[in-house]
Amino acid sequence: SALATLKNMGLLKGINPLLTADLLHVLRSMGHGDKLCLCDCNFPAATVATKTTSQKNVILSCTLPEAIDAICSVLPLDFFEHTQASFMAPQESPGAPVALVKDMPTAGIEVVEALKTTIRKHCPDATIESWGRFDFYDEATTCFAVVQTMERRPYGNIILTKGCVGPDGKDLKP
């Protein structure tokens, strides 16, 4: 696959080539508690990015799970917070109840399951919950930056909260 070929073409050893210089700079600039919005190709990334802390919108030519895999290989998650990651779920209107994952379109269920599996590959204890669509949009504007992927499945949007790297080189936990 193209990704397998890319993994052998990186300029740094042990660093996923999806982690561009711009993206690595964003990840390194974030502090613990800062949030990163990863989104699909239909998300209003450019608009939302103008309201974020860094006003950065990094575009990656990959799926959401591929981006999460690359980012979570270097980004510690915040285990001092109740939730380390929050994904978008259907919501009819602001303030309306959030739909259950089972009520998503099939492709939405697939991408949510893939993102959960990918995050837990790197952080098995991560708590991942859903946010309603309109609440997610509001929360995305409070993020440090936006990373837009080429993900085309609906609801392929997630916010990760950065934690600290502990003395053992792993995610610091209480």
Image (spheres, rainbow, N blue to C red):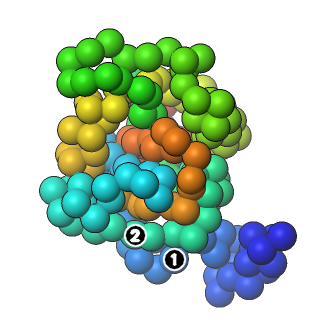
Under circle 2, the secondary element is strand
Q: Which residue is drawn at 52% across and 69% down?
A: 60
The image shows a total of numbered marks equal to 2
Q: Residue 58 carries which label?
A: 2
Which quadrant of the figure contains the N terminus?
bottom right
| x, y percent for residue 86 | 42, 32
Label 2 to label 1: alpha-carbon separation: 9 Å
| x, y percent for residue 85 | 45, 34
Say above or below: 130 vs 72.
Answer: above
Under circle 1, the secondary element is loop
Q: Residue flagged by tag 1: what amino acid is it? A: Thr
User: Residue 6 is drawn in which quadrant?
Assistant: bottom right
Q: Residue flagged by tag 2: what amino acid is it? A: Val
Is residue 13 shown to the viewer in this render?
yes
Is residue 164 shown to the viewer in this render?
no
Instruction: Determine whether, in the image, residue 31 is placed left or right of residue 66.
Output: left
Say above or below: 100 vs 61.
Answer: above
Circle 1 residues within 10 Å: few <14, some 14–19, many ≥20: some
| x, y percent for residue 131 | 37, 26
Q: Residue 20 carries which label?
A: 1
Tag 2–tag 1 contact (CB < 8 Å): yes
